[in-house]
Image (cartoon, helix red, strand yellow):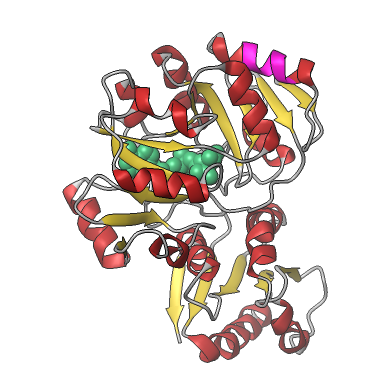
Amino acid sequence: MTDVVRVDAERPDRAAIRRAADRLRDGGLVAFPTETVYGLGVHALDREAVRRLFAAKGRPASDPVIVHVAAREDLEPLVRGVPDAVSALAARFWPGPLTIVLPRSAGVPDEVTAGRDTVAVRVPAHPVAQALLVEAGVPVAAPSANLFSRPSPTQAAHVIVDLDGRIDMVVDGGPTLVGLESTVLDLTGAVARVLRPGAVTVEMLRAILPRVETSGPEAAAEDQAAGMASPGLLPRHYAPRTPLLLYGGGDAALPALLRDAREVLATGRTIGLLALEEDRKMLGALDAPPSRMHVVTLGSVGNLEGVATRLYAALRELDAAGLDLILARELPVTSGLGLAINDRLGRAAHEHRTC
Ligand code: TXA
Ligand code: MG
């Protein structure tokens, strides 16, 4: 039912892109790679298609989706006025993993914005996404191409697992580079505010804009109570089905994790471990057979890009292993990309242990 078309990530086949673009213009649901994660695209101005998109993902209608366009110039019809800050941000970060929230124009359907007065817009950098947007010639609404509340897909295979038979087409351009969803920056308030941290880091934004606020857990809770800001940023959003215990607290986290892992193994249960390269030696001391303990390594904390790229595939792998419990620790970094990685780990966690 779902057509899967393989294309070269750098030089996608024109005919394949034309077919995908035709499908999009006709109201079809087409998954495609962006540099962050795979998106599930539909014609953003086709209300019926957007409704089908929400149904296919099982996404609540209250959670607005990002509109993707080929270039900065395509922004105007979607928004009411373009603040000065956008030019500077676009010049530096577009195309790329930055989404900007602005007051929306009347042309954007309520289905896209969940009835809000704002719209989130992004210009993706991936050559396949670029080719598709140029060929389609319409704005494309695209959430991540996963079932609601599953980890975002970083490979076409993840899209198929979640959505086979529910969507029209998958353009398979291989694994995505960044591995985490775009940074979402809200420019509708008095001060710019990061609603979702990502590969365009707060530090990078502050180099362009004098003031950028972040939404800490308290701010997010307040917003949720008031029904504002980013409704999709639920405290638990990317959760695996297997319960995940997340250990915070810096240096104390790993010893606490090991102690608990030993206890759980002693009761005969099976565990999965989301590990850093640096943890492997200590984890070796657990000495459990592979049938009881499944370790996935994210790479070194010295290479956060690599950790981000692997995170969602690792969560899916551990989840598919049918274990009783997954144990992970927060990264011992709170700036740059570390902020985004810890944010996603936090949302994937069923329980937090601060050590
Ligand atoms: O990297 C990405 O952003 C990927 C790729 C496909 O572009 N897309 C993605 O979309 O992650 P999605 O729908 O999974 O996440 C969009 C986030 C949600 O948290 C949503 O609530 C927020 O952006 N959002 C969308 N429109 C918004 C708006 N008008 N105001 C505030 N937040 C908004
Ligand atoms: Mg998503």
For residue 117, above or below residue 153:
above
Q: Quadrant of the N terminus?
A: top right
For residue 31, above or below residue 337:
above
For residue 153, above or below residue 11:
below
For residue 165, above or below residue 279:
above
- The spot of residue 207 in percent (x, y) is 42, 64
Q: Nearer the viewer, residue 326 or 33?
A: 33
- The spot of residue 354 in percent (x, y) is 43, 82
State ligand 1's quadrant: top left
* Visible residue check, residue 28: no
Q: How many marks?
A: 0
* Visible residue check, residue 175: yes
- The spot of residue 329 in percent (x, y) is 56, 76
Q: Tell me where residue 28 sits by quadrant.
A: top right
Magenta stretch: residue 194 in it? no
Magenta stretch: residue 19 in it? yes
Q: Which residues, given as a range, are shown in magenta?
A: 17-22
- The spot of residue 226 in percent (x, y) is 17, 49
Residue at coordinates 39% horizontally, 43% vertically from top-left?
87
Relative horizontal placement of residue 182, taking residue 225 as reference (left or right): right
Q: Tell me where residue 274 sits by quadrant.
A: bottom right
As drawn, the residue found furthest toward the top would be: 26
Predominant SS along the magenta part: helix
Relative horizontal placement of residue 168, taking residue 81 as reference (left or right): right
